[in-house]
Image (cartoon, rainbow, N blue to C red):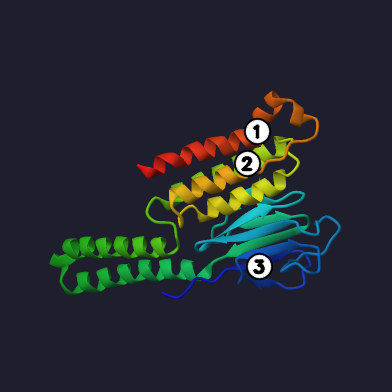
Amino acid sequence: MKDSKHYIVVVSGKADQKRYELTKGSIHAGSDPACDIRLPGPDIAPLHFLLQLSGDRYILVRKDRSVQVNGREVGQAVLNHNDTIKVGGFVLSYQQPDLAEQSKTLRDGAGGATEQDAAANPRKRSNLTMILLAVYLVAMSLLLAYAGVFMGGDGDNDMLQKRLQELDKACQNSHLVNKDEIRDMVMEAFLAETRVPWQEMHRRLKTALNSTVPTAADAYDEKILAEDPLRLFLLDEARRVVPMAK
């Protein structure tokens, strides 16, 4: 199976291009001329958002100002085929046509084979339908596994998106000097979670926790430092990873 292609299509707004193919692991979008997706305009930040590849999906990470996905304000979001992204006066669409076409082909092929065989021999309709349904489910499982989503993957994606939202909220309420740097470290750890042993995941989270830098005022108040939302989030994540050893 060939690798799935990804695109950002400009639905409305005057951008440099109408369609951008996403060919890198990290895509920069904003008004800066150096961005991979340049969106000129006074309401667009120089680096407005990032698109970070994880498996066969892209995760949108807001870097500045407002970003909406399917009409909802987000800090991070796992993108799906046909998702709508609104930034400033631009409306964008995330497209993954290869994966969508493969799913359609499997559905059409299963349906067509059933109809032809049923017309030739109606007595085999029930058995053939069950066989084709089983083949279709196996094929879809392999397709989703290749895309890094596996059966139940929608739930996994929802959980990842929830954790990313909790991370963003913790960063917004944190007083740490280097909270943006810590967020990037945790993002990288989350994206690598399915590819590394739990010990490595735990090490990355502990490294992020030990790298936190308090403000000069908070450094002398152990209670404030201990109750910092980002530090508490990192502690919870480190505890969550340990049961993976079982």
Quadrant showing the C terminus: top left
The residue shown at (61%, 69%) is: 24
Residue underneath mark 2 = 210
Seen from this angle, which residue lies furthest right? 42
Q: Is residue 6 left or right of residue 12?
A: left
- Could you tell me which secondary element the residue under label 3 belongs to? strand
Q: Which mark is residue 9?
A: 3
Which is in the foreground here, disc 3 or disc 1? Answer: 1
Tell us which disc is closer to us: 1 or 2: 2
Percent across and percent down for residue 58 are 57, 60
User: Mark 1: which amino acid?
Assistant: Pro
The numbered mark, 1 or 2, whose residue comes first in the sequence reads: 2
Q: Nearer the viewer, residue 139 or 50?
A: 50
Residue wearing tag 1? 229
Mark 1–mark 2 distance (CA, rounded to whole Å): 15 Å
Q: Would you identify the image quadrant in which residue 224 lies? A: top right
